Image: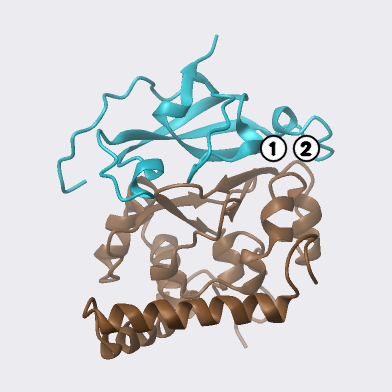
Chain colours: A brown, B cyan
Amino acid sequence: MNEPGELPRADRVGYYRRMQAAVEELLILRGVFTAADVDRQVEAMDGRSHERGARMVARAWVDPAYRGRMLADGSAAAEALGLEVGPLRLIVVENTPEVHNVIVCTLCSCYPRMLLGIPPEWYKSRAYRSRVVREPRAVLAEFGLQLAAGVRIRVHDSTADMRYLVLPMRPAGTGGWSEERLAALVTRDALIGVAQLPDVSESADR
Amino acid sequence: MGRTLEAAAPRFRPGDRVRVRAAHPPGHVRTPHYCRGQVGVVERLCGAFPNPEELAYNRPGLPAQPLYRVRFRAVELWPDYREDPADVVEIEIYQHWLEGAA
């Protein structure tokens, strides 16, 4: 799928791959960093997944004081669980029965990588970035999410120095669950806001 | 925020109505086109950050610009908006892009 005026996808990827390889080689030759530094960073990036964000959500569900702290200062709340976020400035937005939050970066593809890992391809697509701000329900429906009537949508355009994480609603039927078990329910898409977590009432005690 | 930067004083507070400048300068601008000229309400002040329009050209971007989250009604951003009229879009905007609105 090409946008008007763009190179065919394969050529575009090839162009940027070559550019990336050339710049990387030059920076290594100049001694700005070493090949081992690059490998270490790539490994660290690959090692991060949405499980980090899921841990924060599970803690917020079982600990109201932590939830309050997370909504007041997301970065501090991440660090309180030993999750290093570096210079990331995190804002956590809470879903309620009245308000559904969804995250986008219309300008590029800003994403809380320190907590969710590498963004999915669709998050970086022009279709998602341009449409979710002007027809959010239509986009969410394509993800299989139908919001209840009367739920308002808050789209967060991550345009500058902040990064965003959605605090999903705790699924019904999870009373008494351990933090680990709760964390395992939390999906990447729910943390971006393009999914809700299904109730588990029927299977809870089997 | 850890470090102390030379920063411009914040001119707006949460709840203030602000208008985004309807300007179209070239360069690395982090203000989306779709909100330029639009009126919204300050949701919060996020702190002060070096101006990315300067940083992109390897300049220091000081004084740091206060950064706000501004809430816009979707029906005002998009005249043909067909979903819930209570929906909003919240966008991070630096102070030098904002002016007070009645």
Residue B93 appears left or right of A134: left
Q: Residue at x 49, y 42 (%)?
A: B29
* B91, above or below A169, in the image: above
Residue A16 lies, in percent from the top left, at 56, 75
Give the quadrant of the C terminus of chain B.
top right
* Residue A155 image offset from top left, x and y in percent: 62, 46
Residue bearing mark 1: B87
The answer to whether the residue labelled 1 contacts the one labelled 2, judged by CB atoms less than 8 Å apart, is yes
Q: Quick one: SS at disc 2? A: loop
Q: How far apart in space, not on screen, are marks 1 and 2 (Cα)? A: 6 Å
Q: Is residue A106 left or right of residue A36?
A: right
Q: Amino acid at mark 1?
A: Asp
Residue kind at label 2, given as amino acid type:
Asp
Closest to the observer: A27 or B70?
A: A27
Residue at the spot 35% in from the left edge and 45% down from the top edge: A72
When the figure is inspected, residue A3 is found, relative to residue B22, above or below; the finding is: below
Residue A37 found in image quarter = bottom left
Residue A87 point in image, percent of width and height:
28, 59
Q: Residue under circle 2?
A: B84
Give the SS element for disc 1. Answer: loop
Q: Looking at the rendering, which quadrant does residue A75 occupy?
A: bottom left
User: Which residue is more in the foreground, B60 or B15?
Assistant: B60
- A23 vs A175, left or right, is left
Q: Please tell me which residue lies in front, A172 or A139.
A: A139
- Of all chains, the one bearing label 2 is B
